[in-house]
Image: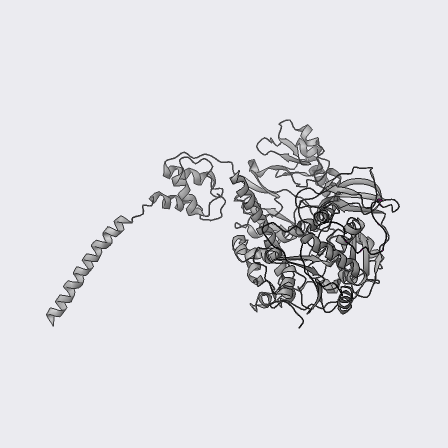
Amino acid sequence: MIKTFPYGGTHPPDNKITAANKIVYLPLPSSVSIPLSQHAGVPSVPIVNKGDRVLVGQLIAKAGGFISANIHSSVSGVVNKIDKVLDSSGYKQNSVIIDVEGDEWISSIDRDPQLKGEIEMSGEEILNRCFESGIVGLGGAAFPTHIKLKVPSDRKCNLLIINGVECEPYLTSDHRLMLEKGDEIITGILIMMKALNVSRAMIGIENNKQDAIEHLMDRCKGIKELTVHPLKVKYPQGGEKQLIKSLINREVPHGGLPVDVGVVVQNVGTAFAVYEAVQKNKPLFERVITITGKSLAFPSNYMVRFGTSVSNLIKAAGGLPENTGKIINGGPMMGKAVSTADVPVVKATSGIVVLTKEESVRRSVEPCIRCAKCNSVCALKLEPYLLMALCQKDMMDRAEAERITDCCECGSCSFICPASRPLLDYIRLGKSQVLRIKRERTLEKIRQNE
Amino acid sequence: MSSTVLLTIISLTLLGLLSAVILYFIAQKFKIFEDPRIDEVQAILPAANCGGCGFAGCRNFAEALVKADTFDGLNCPVGGNATMTTAAHILGKEAIPNDPMVAVLLCNGTPVNRPRTSKYDGPSDCRISHNLYTGETDCAYGCVGLGDCVKACSFNAMYMDSLTELPVIIDDKCVACGLCVKACPRNIIELRKKAKKDRKIYVACANKDKGGPARRACKVACIACNKCYNVCEFDAIKIENNLAYIDAYKCTFCRKCVAVCPTASIIELNFPPPKPKAEVHEATAKV
């Protein structure tokens, strides 16, 4: 029987128009601006200066704290300046701007495309390499992988789940990666299993990607500890809590992490990045990005160097159509519209969706009719209408008690609401405020203990 | 028959008396003394319950006034010094005069000064827009223009100007309760000392970027050029975070800084018209 998670979920039209387009290498831009905060946690600290010559894969910024990641140059050339540049967060962030000259890679990277199957490194070395190579989760949250792969000493992890669900409409980057780099992904999974010291791994793929399921099943024949599981199509199955529930019917407790139920979840993109870092010594400086939209002339999947401007991607896809209403960084459900096409591509960017004016229009907001559709689609059993009302009234303590921080911002509630109420907009606001209050509370506690 | 009636009356009377005695002693035992002056003070407070004093409402403020040894740090901005003097009279304490304040918007980013570079179509809530991105303009510090402050004001002292897309504060109605200051996610509303005839000189900018980017985002942005700092004879101007700030307590309203500001980010308000020449010219033109 094909599995899925039991409660909530929606079925947005999937619009995967680029599923058949092979990954193409995007031509190098004339300059890149690499933000110093591409990951969850503390921004990195730059170690290059204006005028320095850098090569592809050279370290340009060191991790700035415990939860942070290294950043490497994605091009070769000269550092133009380190300045504040508008990025996809909507605000200006410190970035390293590099003028591109040629394409010279540092010599330590093994550029041989041949698959290297055998894993020579020990678990500790793998973690170190992941840290050095600046690997972060490529599913969207960009949490540093070396921390996620290190299980806390008081917990036990017995299963690695690989997320190949890609439930967001429009996006096909993971799908293409699974089809074209299947062997590499499987090697990457084996590497992560070694680092985690687990004996079992599961790959979850929604069954609208039949070709990817068959391909990976074929590839991991003979590997007993690795199994591929087709899943029923339902949004937001790609959320890690939903994926764990779908695959092994365990529930992550409120406020907890997957490791509390003995699981670590990683994206297929991360598995590929780990393979390249460990086997080929290639730091994370490029990734597959889907540039898509019904109005675009050539929507496709591109291998893009970080720091490339979104406008370059759009140019490669045939230029910006006349009636564009919004350019969305990420998928249409969870993504965020950008205010200008000149924002750089970062580690967390999985796709760019160009919507026409008609597609992107927001319907007028009507009063809530208490139909509870938002409640029934919430995969986390939250009450979105209530959370919205609480956030509007600034009642953050109550919102915290209603588990607002559990929200994964999947957008199902806003999608389903017949009164087109801006549920997720307010929940996002409340979530960020509650998280801030919580952070302050922790700091206060630390201060008191001192 | 009559004896039954009599018995009932007597027994009920006795029961009533007994209960009254018990209740009297219980009431004595659990008596809560409330200072009658609290009611008196509350009666003279404005009953706006705005929270401008820092307490939950007027009743709480009255309790705090009665409890306090001195009025230091206690002020009702709505009632002002008159109310505080009356309260002091009731309580037999000394009133500490407080400067009347008024709210001031530290942004002058009208559509003319600050071109709109994108369009926001989300919910009409400043906090959401602020959380999302820099706003419809390139300035990440200025007014978002969705009117959270106007919604917060309970004295009808603010309205949104549809032309400038900025909130306007009506000086006569503003009681400096600070509700708008709290409501603004960008912290660009300041409570400043009220001067004679409501005169104001302040830097109407909150942009902490360096001169170049600030100017590119907004024509009237403060670029921290130091000209006002150099011309000020009263040490009233300080420059911090690429931003000039005029201290309302030190400013003497000489208006020299206004004249030298290259970006016109220093605003003077409620001064008499400076150019009699122009008036003459107008008069002759009419003839």
Residue sitting at x 66%, y 73%: A1
> Nearest the camera: A152 or B227?
A152
Task: Please indicate whether residue A317 sits to the left or right of residue B184 in the image.
Answer: right
Where is residue B269 shown, x and y percent of the image? 62, 39
> Nearest the camera: B56 or A276?
A276
Rendered image quadrant of residue A265:
bottom right
Question: Is residue A113 in the magenta section?
Answer: yes
Where is residue A346 shown, x and y percent of the image? 75, 51
Task: Please indicate whether residue B76 sits to the left or right of residue B182 in the image.
Answer: left
Total labels drawn: 0
Q: Is residue A287 visible?
A: yes
* Outermost right residue: A102
| Rendered view: B40 above or below B262 | below
Rendered image quadrant of residue B63:
top left
Magenta segment range? A105-121
Where is residue B62 shown, x and y percent of the image? 41, 44
